[in-house]
Amino acid sequence: MINFKDFEKIDLRIGTIIEAEAVNGSEKLLRLIVDLGIEERQIIAGIGQSYDPEKLVGTQVAIVANMEPKTLMGLESQGMILATDSEQEGRVSLLMPSEPVADGAKLR
C-alpha cells in the first residue's frame, strides 16, 4: 500500500504513438516514439507479441512520464506504457482513453 502523497508523485499522461518498430534481436520489444504534446519520448515496450507496430501509429496510450530512463537492448526508454495482463499467456492490452484527448493530458 502507498499513501496518496506517494501516488501523487507518479506522472501519468496520455500520448500518441507517432512511430513504432520492432527492436532487432527481440520478439517482445517495440521501439515507440510517443508525442506528449510538449515533447516526444522514445519508449521501449514489451508489447511486440500482442501488437503489430504499424497498427499502433496514431494510437493514444497511457504512460508513466516520470520514470527514470532505462536502457533495454542498447536503447534508452524514457517512460513506461501502461498495459494489463491478458488471460492469454504473453498477451497484453494497452490502456487507452475512451475518446481522443490532448497529448500530454494528465491522468487523475
Image: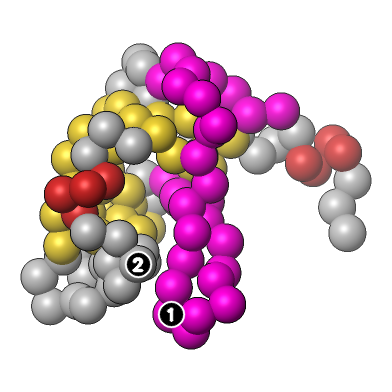
Q: How many marks?
A: 2
Pick the front one: 6 or 28 = 28
| Residue at the bottom extreme, as displayed | 89
- Percent coordinates x, y for residue 13 in the rendering: 53, 31
In percent of width and height, residue 30 lies at: 24, 60
Q: Amino acid at mark 1?
A: Gly
Magenta run includes residue 89: yes
Give the class, few, some or many, for how many residues have Cα within 10 Å of label 1's Cα (few <14, many ≥20): few
Q: Give SS at disc 2.
A: loop
Q: Is residue 65 magenta?
A: no
Q: Main secondary structure of the magenta part?
A: loop
Do the numbered discs 2 and 1 sit on residues whose CB atoms are within 8 Å?
Answer: yes
**Which stretch appears magenta?**
79-108
- Residue 50 marker: 2
- Residue type at mark 2 is Ser
The x and y percentages for residue 62 are 50, 39
Query: For the point 60% across and 34% down, which residue is it?
Result: 11
Judged left or right of residue 47, residue 19 is left
Q: Position of residue 3 (x, y in %)?
A: 89, 46
Q: At numbered mark 1, what does the secondary structure look like: helix, strand or loop?
A: loop
Note whether 51 is above or below 7 in the view shown.
Answer: below
Q: Residue at x 55, y 71 (%)?
A: 86
Horizontally, residue 81 falls left or right of residue 72, namely: right
Q: Nearer the viewer, residue 49 or 6?
A: 49
Residue 104 visible? The answer is: no
Q: Where on the picture, by quarter, is residue 16?
A: top left
| Residue closest to the far left | 24
| Residue with the mark numbered 1 | 90
Which of the image's four quarters has the N terminus? Answer: bottom right
- Please, is residue 102 above or below residue 85 in the view? above
